[in-house]
Image (tube, rainbow, N blue to C red):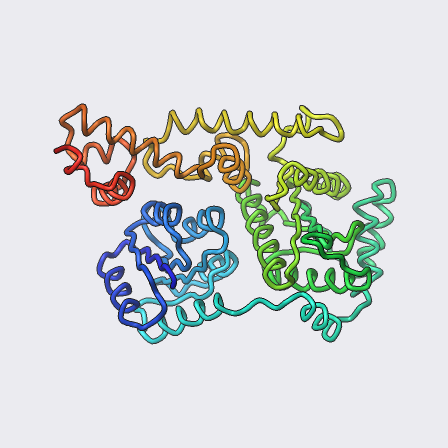
Amino acid sequence: MYNILIADDEPLICRGLANLLESSGLNIENIYTAHNGYEALDYLKMESIDLLVTDIQMGAMSGIELMQQAKIVKPWVQVIVISAHETFQYAQLAMRLGARDYLIKPINSEQLLNSVRHVLLHMDRPEQNQAELIADLREHFRMEQPQPQRMETLDRLVNEPESARELLRTAREQGVDLNGPYFAMLKIRLDCESEGRSVADKDVVLLQYAVLNIVNELLDKDWSHHSFYSANRDVSIIVQWDEASYGGSSSDKINQLEMIGRSLHFNIRKYLGFQCVVGISQILKGHEFLSELNDQVGKAIVWNRQHRDHHLFFYGDFKWELTTEDPTDEELAAQNNLIVEKVKEYVLANYAQKGLTLNEVAQRNHVSPNYLSYLFKKYMGINLWEYVIKLRMEESKRLIQKTDLRRYEISERVGYESPEHFSKIFKKYFGMSPSEMKK
């Protein structure tokens, strides 16, 4: 049985889509409706949502922003986007964020049901066991490296800074475009020894090649990138931007790199059945920093030693000047405690702010949303948004019991967009409505 969330700022459309799905005969347990992105986020954080159907334009928070937040909160949630605009840019961005379909209003009922049916069927597909997987890889993939000379040149380029000028010239002669001038790196480290398994060296080469195919499928033509094999069973990716595509800020680009990292981890785990760790570098300008970027992704992966249950690490999340070259477990733990304490202080001061998002909390505390979400849950025992809701509900209860404020006034004071949505959250949290508590 599946739970579906519909987000659209037109109540009639929400109700119409909900009625259509309720009468479809599909294996649906609950259908939730939200009239803006912030309401939808509450449902995503409090309910077990399998599929999100969202409008792409919804006032204060767009469907694109909602998708970005959803990918952090629950990366496995499937998404279907609906829009009144047949705009290629919107569709391209939605698909890059992992949307399974992009439907144009007015919605054709049969088209929507077919799309939802396809997504749910895909979620039900049984996973292939690893013996079958390796057999399929042997049958379908070449065992030799694709374009081995280019790969060797790229691997040397990021590992031999003293030869960078010569290697750049060689790379260009081999048809590798490294014009930049902005560069970042991702490194994927396959865990071939986990869960009591051991993979033969010849099969590791096959897995690397399969990972390379997943990388190229995900990045395709939307990103200027070069991927290659490197040491320690790793696959590395150089991503680059020219001046026009880079724009003025790196924060959006880092968020996009993290979404790529999450997608890579999810798809490698899903389709290959192996765990991996993904390291992400900062963005630096100039070829001379390629070796520095390679050092950064290697260092970022070190943090998996402290967090075995986490698999995506951004170099910029950590204060490297506060640690030794090879940080101890105590140094790693001290940094994490500091991040969590600062975030708690910020949330206590700002939980009543309307439209508060994980991205904003992360940005204000100089840490990526992905790592903050993981770290807060690990140290506090509840996720960040549950903590925000807890603070809002406790303050609401105090205001109901100690003041004569009306429901809409209390809703305003604790940061909710509408009194109706506030009442829904309140009743779910306390088991009674605000008016029942007042009595």
Q: Residue furthest front?
A: 196
Nearest the camera: 151 or 118?
Answer: 118
Please give the name of the residue rendered at 78% of the width and 62% of the height, measured from the top-left corner. Answer: 205
Please give the name of the residue rendered at 44% of the width and 66% of the height, measured from the top-left corner. Answer: 101
Q: Position of residue 149 (x, y in %)?
A: 84, 60
Please give the name of the residue rendered at 33% of the width and 76% of the height, measured from the top-left corner. Answer: 110
Q: Is residue 104 left or right of residue 377?
A: left
Q: Quadrant of the N terminus?
A: bottom left
Q: Quadrant of the C terminus?
A: top left
Q: Position of residue 81 (x, y in %)?
A: 40, 61
Q: Is residue 275 left or right of residue 374?
A: right
Q: Position of residue 381 (x, y in %)?
A: 47, 36
Number of residue marks: 0
Nearest the camera: 168 or 94?
Answer: 94
Q: Is residue 218 left or right of residue 229?
A: left
Q: Position of residue 237 (x, y in %)?
A: 70, 52
